[in-house]
Image (cartoon, grey):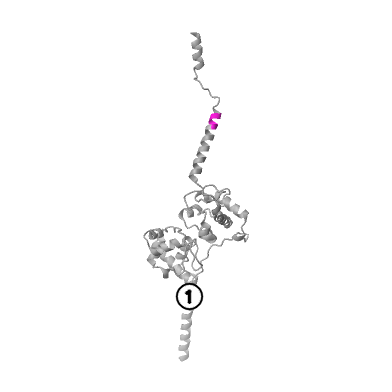
């Protein structure tokens, strides 16, 4: 009987041990997919978990730094918290170059799922969050980008070269203070010094996975390729480097001057076309004959 009892006890211990292994493996293999999916879709362009600051702060252990309610309110509308004078929100805004975090149309439950995912990543129970690496398909890194790469980026930015997937040119919404570039749109931020604010990694992350609603909609079905992103960042790096030597562009004065020049040209053309027009009344000759016949 003792032998049988020992055998049963050993088997029970073995089964319990096996069950613990299965549970542990399942935790590693099957993470909180809801939170992970939302994070990779919404947050990964600006944030990492344990890999340092990007466009925004590193979110490792953010649940230990802020309460759940604070995180939910900040994700939903960071600007509302900043305007209310919340000291932590204001400090983050100032530390990260006053870049506005877009309001996220997420439910409390979805944000809680993200927080759970961040907790898992912070403790190393999940896969490490990967950030976009800026490398040309040929293996060239940004430090070796030369005039050819910068020119390609400039042409893509201002629309001289069409993006491969037919997305809109950056200049449609953005402006850069660069002598070779025409004045751009005012819908989004001026990108003249964005390289010094976000770095190559930050810009690349935003291009790869746009976090801003308008940009996300514009490029959702027209993604920018790896090489195009490389050229654009190389161009913005050059723009940032040359910005102290560039003259500020006064778009209103340029528009007014172009309007005056265009008006003068049009009047000149109309005058040339109508130079030999009939200048007197249609009935002038008939009138003269009638006068003579009297």
Main secondary-structure element of the magenta-colored stretch: helix
User: As drawn, is 87 to the left or to the right of 200?
Assistant: left
Q: How many marks?
A: 1
Kindly identify the residue that appears in the image at 44 percent across and 61 percent down.
94
Q: Secondary structure at mark 1?
A: helix
- Quadrant in the rendering for residue 105: bottom left
For image coordinates 52% across by 37% down, the residue present is 262
Q: Residue furthest top?
A: 294
Q: Nearer the viewer, residue 229 or 268?
A: 268
Q: Which residues are magenta?
A: 268-272
Q: Which residue is label 1 attached to?
A: 24
Relative depth, front residue between 22 and 9: 22
Q: Position of residue 77 (x, y in %)?
A: 40, 59
Q: Magenta span has 269?
A: yes
> Can residue 207 be seen from the camera position used here?
no
Q: Residues within 10 Å of mark 1 (few under 14, many from 20)?
A: few
């Amino acid at each position: 009987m003792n032998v049988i009892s020992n055998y049963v006890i050993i088997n029970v211990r073995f089964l319990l041990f096996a069950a613990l292994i299965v549970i542990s493996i399942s935790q590693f293999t099957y993470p909180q997919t809801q939170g992970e999916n939302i994070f990779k879709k919404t947050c990964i362009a600006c944030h990492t978990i344990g890999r340092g600051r990007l466009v925004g702060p590193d979110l490792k252990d953010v649940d230990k730094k802020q309460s759940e309610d604070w995180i939910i309110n900040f994700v939903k509308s960071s600007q509302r918290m900043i305007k209310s004078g919340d000291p932590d929100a204001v400090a983050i805004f100032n530390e990260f170059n006053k870049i506005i975090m877009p309001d996220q149309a997420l439910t409390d439950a979805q944000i809680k799922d993200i927080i759970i995912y961040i907790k898992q990543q912070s403790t190393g129970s999940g896969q490490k969050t990967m950030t976009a690496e800026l490398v040309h398909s040929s293996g060239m890194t940004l430090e070796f980008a030369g005039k050819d790469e910068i020119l390609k980026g400039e042409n893509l930015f201002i629309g001289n070269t069409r993006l491969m997937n037919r997305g809109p040119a950056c200049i449609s919404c953005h402006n850069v203070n660069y002598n070779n570039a025409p004045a751009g749109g005012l819908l989004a931020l001026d990108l003249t010094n964005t390289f010094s604010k976000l770095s190559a990694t930050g810009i690349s992350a935003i291009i790869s996975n746009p976090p801003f609603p308008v940009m996300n909609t514009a490029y959702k079905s027209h993604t920018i390729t790896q090489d195009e992103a490389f050229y654009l960042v190389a161009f913005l790096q050059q723009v940032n480097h040359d910005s102290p030597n560039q003259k500020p562009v006064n778009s209103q004065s340029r528009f007014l001057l172009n309007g005056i020049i265009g008006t003068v040209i049009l009047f000149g053309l109309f005058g040339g076309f109508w130079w030999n027009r009939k200048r007197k009344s249609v009935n002038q000759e008939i009138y003269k004959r009638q006068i003579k016949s009297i």
